[in-house]
Image (tube, rainbow, N blue to C red):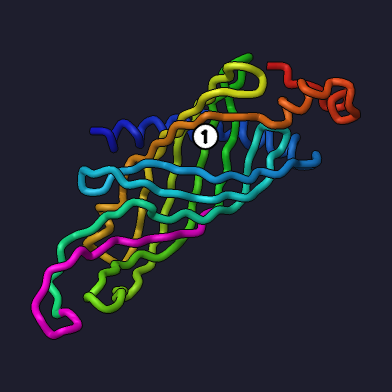
Amino acid sequence: MFKKVSLIVFIVCRLTINAQFLDTIKSITHKRPSVDARIETRNSFFENGRAKVTGVRLGLIFQKKLRAGVGYSWLSSDISEKKAITNYLGNKDTVNNYLKFGYIAFYTDFVFYKKKRWQVSVPLQWGAGLTWYNYNNGAEDIASSKDYLLLYEPGISVQFKIFRWCGLGTDIAYRFTLQNNQGLRNKLNSPTYGFKFLIWFDQLYYLGFPKSKHSKKYGPADW
């Protein structure tokens, strides 16, 4: 049920903002952008359990309307299944076989609704990476052969400003994957979500140093 609702929401949002997105791109990309650098954590699900994915991103921000860049994400939760092995002593044993994956992804995040305190945007990322398993036989770590992973992750992001310089946010998305490991394919398809406490350091600077050259030129944000 959640998959169907997610798909409907994402398709409607994409169709709604498509024309607006193209018009906005033409008007903002010729202006000087700022840097977008982030470390983030998102939660997803794996076989009814929570799986945390950590990532780093580096890109550009165009007129506070569009973010675009590239990032690297990896599974940071311990997810494992039992595996029967012959250990380094030649004895039968059962160990934890840990799932690993990492991927490089391009991302965009387009703001299509903005009011005094509220902002709604549509983030999207797509990329490729590898998945594999890893276990310890008592003497060393043994990694399985690596499988290719392709992913596409559309979502919706909502922000609420408490003050001009800080706010709260949440991201909800769905991760679609395509890979050559049939056993993992459906397991990695999952809703993802994250909660954020946001600080805009440029606004702190403008408020703290209102007479500086940059503050006079760019000034504090108009909510």
The picture places residue 34, in percent across and down from the top left corner, at: 74, 41
Q: Residue at x 23, y 44 (%)?
A: 49
Q: Amino acid at mark 1?
A: Val
- For disc 1, the neighbor class at 10 Å (few under 14, some 14 to 19, many from 20) is many
Magenta segment main secondary structure: strand
Closest to the observer: 82 or 120? 82
Closest to the observer: 18 or 35? 35
Q: Secondary structure at mark 1?
A: strand
Q: Residue at x 26, y 48 (%)?
A: 46
The picture places residue 75, in percent across and down from the top left corner, at: 38, 54
Is 129 left or right of 30, judged from the image as shown? left
Query: Looking at the image, which residue sits at the far bottom?
Result: 90
Query: Which quadrant of the view contains residue 203?
Result: top right
The picture places residue 100, in percent across and down from the top left corner, at: 34, 62
Query: Label 1 belongs to which residue?
Result: 122
Query: Looking at the image, which residue sits at the far top?
Result: 116
**Is 89 within the magenta?**
yes
Q: Range of the magenta residues?
A: 87-105
